């Protein structure tokens, strides 16, 4: 009965509910640490640990710890982890979360408890619009925005028709919706494949038959590795250009290598952005872990520093959730992406860039920043959010 009662209490009441004075900052971090997508979780975990190390393991004088959980790419497992972190570990914040379907699954138990939820990756449109909440923030982007940038760029290149592909889950649908919002040419096909699929030979055969001007895909993690390798092996890469988002990055390029050379990506962050905080982060990350960080790492690093800023603002009084939310809303910290501000729905208003996959001096393949596509871009759903500033 107690658990059910807590779940239906209003967030407004819980944000002011009295509690014992905290002696430690506890952060629940949900990600994927096993299977083909485990490399993404490794980037996120390493970056979060680095951020906490840079803070000396404390926030506002309180010792801080991160409790990690492996969601195994499953919404039900993610929700179970969130409930355990809230009830057993008594976490003050929940962050991490790669997959949009997992974030949607943990949203209700975390937000209804009054706990602050900060996404370090996933950005489903529901949370940017009708399901926005005072105690939810994104440290990354809304799903549609990055493909919107690629749609804008491909339109500027006068590409006449595009073949679209993505996994059949919440983020895949958001990604293609965002692309179509800004691409003004013809959609040759819109194909949704099984989430976690590894063999794309049948789909590549269909692309060959369709003969589109270009292909646009969203395949994060292991899905991207398999698709890019198979696309290159098919011989289509030299005939039909491949554009993507969240597909060719520092989690996949070490395995894909030359098969991604020349491909274009879009995103809000890159290792070569010329900001002091970013230079420090990339240098320390490579020195500590001996590999180049991805945007997943950058978002996680920012999420921990965002939390630290909120705890400092209330001088370690973790009972003051309203004060921490007000501090989070100001985004007054040195982000690795450079300065940004929050929209009314607590999603960042930020720049989006075009990247090209090139061979670096050390022989590895990296994303090189080419230009800004959008300056201070807002997501398409904030007007559906009922919160006001």
Image (cartoon, rainbow, N blue to C red):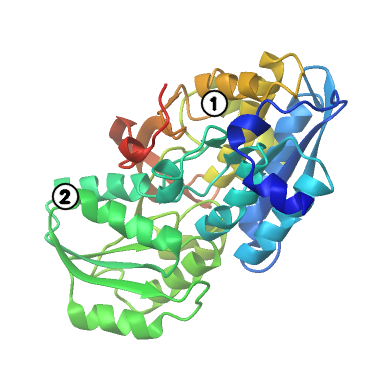
Instruction: Tell me which corner region of the image, top left, top right, bottom left or bottom right, holds residue 27.
Output: top right
Is residue 387 shown left or right of residue 316? left
Instruction: Tell me which corner region of the image, top left, top right, bottom left or bottom right, holds residue 21.
Output: top right
Image spot of residue 179 (x, y percent):
27, 54
Is residue 151 or residue 384 the one in the foreground? 384
- Screen quadrant of the N terminus: bottom right
Is residue 227 shown left or right of residue 48? left
**Residue in the picture at 46% in, 21% down:** 339
Task: Identify whether 171 is placed above or below 230.
Answer: above
Q: Residues within 10 Å of mark 2 (few under 14, many from 20)?
A: some
Is residue 98 shown left or right of residue 384? right
Residue 291 visible within the image? no
Total numbered circles: 2
Residue 346 visible within the image? yes
| Label disc, if present, on residue 335 of the rendered structure | 1
Image spot of residue 187 (x, y percent):
18, 65
- Screen quadrant of the C terminus: top left
Image spot of residue 91 (x, y percent):
77, 39
| Label disc, if present, on residue 87 of the rendered structure | none
For mark 2, what is the residue?
Answer: 155
**Residue in the picture at 60% in, 38% down:** 10
Query: Gap in Å between the C-alphas at discs 1 and 2?
Result: 30 Å
């Amino acid at each position: 009965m107690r658990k059910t009662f807590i779940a239906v209490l209003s967030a407004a009441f819980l944000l002011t509910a009295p509690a014992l004075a905290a002696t430690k900052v506890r952060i629940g971090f949900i990600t994927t640490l096993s299977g083909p997508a485990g490399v993404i979780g490794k980037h996120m975990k390493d970056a979060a640990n680095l951020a906490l190390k840079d803070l000396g393991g404390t926030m506002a004088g309180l010792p801080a710890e991160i409790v990690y959980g492996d969601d195994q790419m499953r919404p039900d497992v993610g929700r179970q982890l969130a409930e355990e972190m809230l009830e057993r570990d008594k976490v003050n914040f929940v962050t991490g979360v790669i997959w949009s379907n997992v974030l949607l699954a943990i949203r209700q138990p975390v937000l209804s408890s009054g706990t602050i939820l900060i996404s370090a990756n996933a950005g489903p449109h529901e949370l940017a619009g009708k399901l926005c909440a005072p105690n939810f923030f994104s440290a990354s982007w809304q799903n549609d925005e990055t493909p919107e940038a690629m749609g804008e760029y491909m339109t500027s290149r006068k590409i006449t028709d595009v073949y679209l592909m993505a996994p059949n889950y919440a983020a895949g649908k958001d990604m293609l919706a965002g692309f179509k919002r800004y691409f003004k040419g013809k959609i040759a096909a819109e194909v949704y494949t099984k989430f976690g699929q590894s063999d794309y030979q049948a789909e590549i055969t269909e692309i060959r038959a369709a003969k589109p001007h270009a292909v646009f895909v969203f395949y994060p993690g292991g899905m991207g590795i398999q698709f890019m390798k198979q696309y290159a092996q098919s011989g289509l890469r030299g005939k039909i250009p491949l554009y993507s988002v969240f597909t060719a990055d520092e989690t996949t390029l070490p395995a894909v290598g030359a098969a991604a050379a020349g491909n274009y990506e879009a995103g809000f962050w890159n290792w070569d952005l010329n900001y002091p905080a970013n230079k420090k982060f990339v240098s320390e990350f490579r020195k500590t872990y001996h590999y180049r960080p991805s945007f997943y790492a950058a978002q996680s690093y920012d999420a921990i520093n965002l939390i630290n800023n909120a705890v400092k603002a209330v001088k370690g009084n973790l009972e003051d959730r309203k004060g921490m939310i007000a501090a989070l809303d100001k985004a007054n910290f040195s982000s690795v992406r450079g300065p940004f501000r929050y929209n009314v729905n607590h999603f960042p208003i930020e720049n989006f860039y075009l990247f090209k996959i090139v061979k670096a001096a050390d022989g590895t393949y990296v994303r090189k920043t080419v230009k800004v596509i959008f300056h201070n871009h807002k997501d398409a759903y904030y007007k559906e959010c009922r919160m006001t500033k």
